[in-house]
Image (cartoon, rainbow, N blue to C red):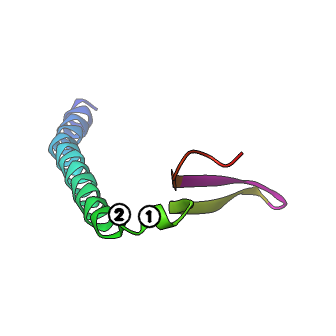
Amino acid sequence: MASSLVELNALLDSFVPLSKKVSIAEIKVLEKEAEALDKILARVWMLMPCLYDCHIINRRELVPTGENSGFAVSNRLTLFDGGPKP
């Protein structure tokens, strides 16, 4: 039994470097996404004032929770020129 615990402990220790690698990779991906968004916004920035409101991000996802049930998750990033509509 003791050897099983030692093996389990060694196995769990081996996951620590992997967890750190995943965290570093996640940070790098977020940085690359931010750079890409910055480049996109730089290219379309001059056109945005022509639009009263511009949906930069408009994502909606339906999440089923059962056979006849679920909910929706929406994320929207909108640029308003002159403030929101009354």
Check the image and name the residue furthest to the right. Answer: 68
Q: In which quarter of the image is residue 8?
A: top left
Q: Is residue 7 magenta?
A: no
Q: How crowded is mark 1: few (under 14 residues within 10 Å), some or many (20 or more)?
A: some
Residue drawn at the location 63% of the way across and 52% of the way down: 73
Q: How crowded is mark 2: few (under 14 residues within 10 Å), some or many (20 or more)?
A: few
Amino acid under label 1?
Answer: Met
Residue 72 falls within the magenta-colored stretch: yes
Q: Is residue 78 left or right of residue 47?
A: right
Q: Is the magenta stretch mostly helix, strand or loop?
A: strand
Res 19 → quadrant: top left
Quadrant in the picture for the C terminus: top right
Q: Name the residue under label 2.
A: 45
Residue 36 vs 14, above or below: the answer is: below
The quadrant of the image that shows the N terminus is top left
Q: Is mark 2 on a helix, strand or loop?
A: loop
Q: In this view, does 11 lie to the left or right of 60?
A: left
- The one nearer the camera, 47 or 22, is 47
Q: Residue at x 19, y 40 (%)?
A: 16
Q: Where is residue 71 in the image (x, y as percent from the top left)?
A: 73, 52
Q: What label sits on residue 37 in the rendered view?
A: none
Q: Give how far apart the Cα atoms at labels 2 and 1 are.
A: 5 Å
Query: SS for tag 1?
Result: helix
For the magenta stretch, what is the residue range?
67-76
Between residues 4 and 74, which one lies in front from this camera angle?
A: 74
- Residue at position x 29%, y 70% in the image: 43
Q: Which residue is drawn at 23% across and 48% down?
A: 27
User: In the picture provided, is 50 more to the left or to the right than 73?
Assistant: left
In the image, residue 69 lies at what x, y percent?
A: 81, 55
Three-letter code for the amino acid on which mark 2 is drawn = Trp
Q: Do callouts 2 and 1 mark residues in contact (Cβ within 8 Å)?
A: yes
**Residue 48 tag number:** 1
